[in-house]
């Protein structure tokens, strides 16, 4: 049995766990803990090690989705998680501009670990306070070549679309590399 | 759609940069614990602004700029609100009290100073209303934000923020192929010109700082200003840029890798 993995990263409360849960065929192995730090109490629990989802591709192949812990104090895990990944997704909460700088920094960190293909998913685009994609692109200082896609992490079609876009990019780079 | 948040997390410099690059029209409302202020924009240019309850009438601005004396200012104030700023400006110019140039220069100075004052805000909330246009009864200017951003950044004291934006001096700068600003209209300081002369993807910021005998904060401040003004972008130094790697699937040929990714695509589509 062959396994491949993709990493879902992003700031605290960006929607990484929800993203993986939406498409995983197993209950996400999530190591969540109650949040104790007052400033981070946007939600009750947070991922302290990693989320772990699985999609069986066929009899010989399994795709694993790893979600990184959102809080910076667990960033020692990131490099370990990024080892051997096919590509990665940076989730950004479109409604919380205060996390954009953090998202940018996480993106740079992961690119440094492994310059594999990646895309940026602007999560919570179904909410009225969500920033426009073009505004987010400027705020996140993303080059026009970087894919920034709208996302609703709880919506299966939306999550599928993000995964497919990343896979198309991976495929393109493989084919370009072969040329 | 909403552009709102906290200045602690999203600085005025970033907001102005966003408005500048997206050529936005509307009004940016800012509020801290003591005072409210607002800035109005048209197509990414600063048109008008107000700080708290301060008198920002044309008469007050000209008086503060010493273009009107106290008696003239008092006389105009006594006439109350019988005419708006546009009418008053026309009257003063036609009567020869001030020139049109002086009116525009005084307004520009007022707005520029207002933005610089706002740069000192590190706490407070902001909200951008794209429906609220600059007031019609006031004289609207068209001040480019690029120089305001550069000047504002010069005044930034928040070293931590600069370190946040440019965590490593191992990166390099390169000129944008299509700058977001008209480079000919940029007013750079002597320090900025010195850095500009060294901009090359082969030179890291650390090397530029060493060559120019600048400290870490000085080089960060200049680099950040130039990036925010849309003149340059940050890149990895050419010598250390890792070549993009093909995603690794151990023990697989290129053909097998492509086939594997295609299988994953097919499976995801069918979910």
Image (tube, coloured by chain):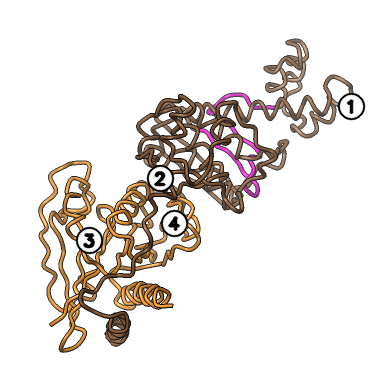
Chain colours: A orange, B brown
Are tags 4 and 2 found on a single chain? no
Q: What residue do we see at 18% from left, 83% from top?
A: A61
**Distance of mark 3 from mark 1, alpha carbons?**
70 Å
Which numbered tag is attached to residue B5?
2
Residues drawn in magenta:
B37-57
Q: Helix, strand, or loop for circle 3?
A: helix
Q: Which mark is residue A82?
A: 3
Pinpoint the chain carrying mark 1: B
Residue at (75, 11) in percent of width and height? B69
Do discs 3 and 4 share a chain?
A: yes
Up/down of A100 relative to A81, above or below? above
* Side of A135 where B98 appears, left or right: right
Report which quarter residue B109 is drawn in: top right
- Of tags 1 and 2, the one toward the viewer is 2
Q: Which subunit holds the residue at mark 4?
A: A
B214, above or below B172, in the image: above
The quadrant in which residue A25 appears is bottom left
């Amino acid at each position: 049995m062959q396994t491949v993995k993709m990493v879902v990263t992003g700031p605290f409360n960006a929607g990484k766990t929800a993203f993986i849960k939406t498409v995983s065929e197993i209950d996400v192995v999530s190591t969540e803990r109650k949040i104790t730090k007052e400033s981070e109490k946007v939600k009750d629990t947070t991922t302290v090690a990693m989320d772990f989802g699985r999609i069986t591709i066929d009899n010989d192949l399994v795709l694993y989705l790893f979600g990184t812990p959102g809080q910076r104090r667990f960033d020692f895990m990131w490099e370990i998680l990024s080892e051997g990944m096919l590509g990665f997704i940076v989730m950004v909460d479109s409604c919380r501009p205060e996390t954009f700088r953090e998202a940018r920094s996480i993106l740079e960190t992961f690119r440094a670990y492994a310059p594999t293909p990646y895309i940026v998913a602007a999560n919570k685009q179904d909410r009225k306070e969500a920033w426009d994609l073009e505004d987010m692109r400027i705020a996140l200082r993303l080059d026009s070549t970087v894919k920034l896609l709208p996302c609703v992490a709880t919506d299966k079609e939306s999550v599928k679309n993000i995964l497919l876009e990343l896979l198309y990019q991976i495929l393109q780079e493989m084919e370009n590399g072969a040329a | 759609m909403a552009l709102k948040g906290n200045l602690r997390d999203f600085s005025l410099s970033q907001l102005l940069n966003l408005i500048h690059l997206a050529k936005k029209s509307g009004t940016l409302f800012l509020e801290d614990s003591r005072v409210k202020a607002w800035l109005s924009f048209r197509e990414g240019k600063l048109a008008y602004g107000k700080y708290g309850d301060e008198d920002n009438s044309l008469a007050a601005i000209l008086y503060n700029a010493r273009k009107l004396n106290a008696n003239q200012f008092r006389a105009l104030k006594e006439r109350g609100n019988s005419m708006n700023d546009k009418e008053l400006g026309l009257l003063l110019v036609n009567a020869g009290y001030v020139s049109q140039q002086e009116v525009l220069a005084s307004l520009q100075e007022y707005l520029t100073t207002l933005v610089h004052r706002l740069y000192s805000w590190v706490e407070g909330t902001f909200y951008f209303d794209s429906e609220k246009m600059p007031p019609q009864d006031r004289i609207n200017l068209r001040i480019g934000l690029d120089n305001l951003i550069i000047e504002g950044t010069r005044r930034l004291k928040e070293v931590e923020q600069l370190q946040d934006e440019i965590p490593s001096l191992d990166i390099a700068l390169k000129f944008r192929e299509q700058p977001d600003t008209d480079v000919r209209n940029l007013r750079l300081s002597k320090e900025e010109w010195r850095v500009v002369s060294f901009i090359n993807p082969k030179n890291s910021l650390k090397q530029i700082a060493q060559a120019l005998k600048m400290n870490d904060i000085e080089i960060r401040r200049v680099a950040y200003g130039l990036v925010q003004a849309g003149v340059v972008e940050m890149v990895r130094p050419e010598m250390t840029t890792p070549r993009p790697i093909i995603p690794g699937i151990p023990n697989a040929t290129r053909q097998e890798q492509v086939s594997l990714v295609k299988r994953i695509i097919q499976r995801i589509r069918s979910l």
